Amino acid sequence: MNPKPTDLILHRASHLLEVAFDDGSRYRLPCEYLRVESPSAEVQGHSPDQRVWVAGKRDVNISAIEPIGNYAVVLRFNDGHETGIYTWSFLKELGEQYEVRWARYLDMLAQQGLSR
């Protein structure tokens, strides 16, 4: 079953996107996290070994949210990035896996000598 969003709220001041689903789950996802985990080919590459670890996005924010049909949104970031299509399933996955993915991101930045 595909998750259906029931709420999508951008908290600009705190740089968070709050998303709730019809199963009762609710996530408050930092804009930085959404930006560095973008589903775009620019970030994800075309295979896992092409993954790009994006640094320097600590203060990034979302400037616009555009619906794509009723299955996804494009998040337009204030750093100019706007090529990722975030499906509801992917947003739910990002919420569910936040702690693991964020820790992995911080580890990869450290390994590469990069900073947020």
Image (cartoon, rainbow, N blue to C red):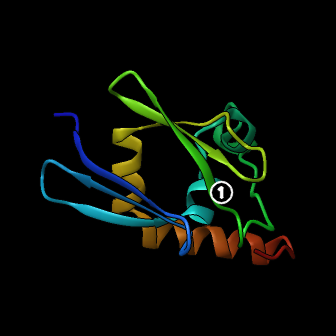
Q: Is residue 5 left or right of residue 108?
A: left
Quadrant of the drawing holding the C terminus: bottom right
Quadrant of the drawing holding the N terminus: top left
Query: Looking at the picture, how far across and down is residue 104, in whole percent?
Result: 59, 69
Query: Looking at the picture, how far across and down is residue 69, in whole percent?
Result: 38, 21
Q: Quadrant of residue 90?
A: top left
What residue lies at 64% left-to-right and 67% top-to-bottom? 105
Q: Is residue 69 left or right of residue 115?
A: left
Q: Is residue 108 above or below residue 5?
A: below
> For the view shown, which residue lies furthest in the right direction?
113
Considering the numbered disc 1 on the image, is that residue within a helix, a strand or a loop? helix
Q: Quadrant of residue 19?
A: bottom left
Q: Nearer the viewer, residue 58 or 50?
A: 58
- Counting the numbered discs, the total is 1
Query: Looking at the picture, how far across and down is residue 67, in whole percent?
Result: 44, 31
Q: Is residue 94 left or right of residue 75?
A: left
Q: Is residue 4 above or below residue 96?
A: above
Q: Is residue 71 left or right of residue 59?
A: left
Q: Quadrant of residue 109?
A: bottom right
What residue lies at 64% left-to-right and 61% top-to-bottom? 61
Q: Nearer the viewer, residue 86 or 62?
A: 62
What residue lies at 70% left-to-right and 63% top-to-bottom? 60
> For the view shown, which residue lies furthest in the left direction?
23
Q: Is residue 33 above or below residue 75?
A: below
Q: Nearer the viewer, residue 81 or 3?
A: 81
> For the view shown, which residue lies furthest in the front direction?
13
Which amino acid does the dot numbered 1 rest on?
Answer: Val
- Mark 1: few/some/many CA within 10 Å (<14, 14-19, 20+): many
What residue lies at 76% left-to-right and 58% top-to-bottom? 54
> For the view shown, which residue lies furthest in the top direction?
69
- Would you name the residue on which mark 1 appears? 36
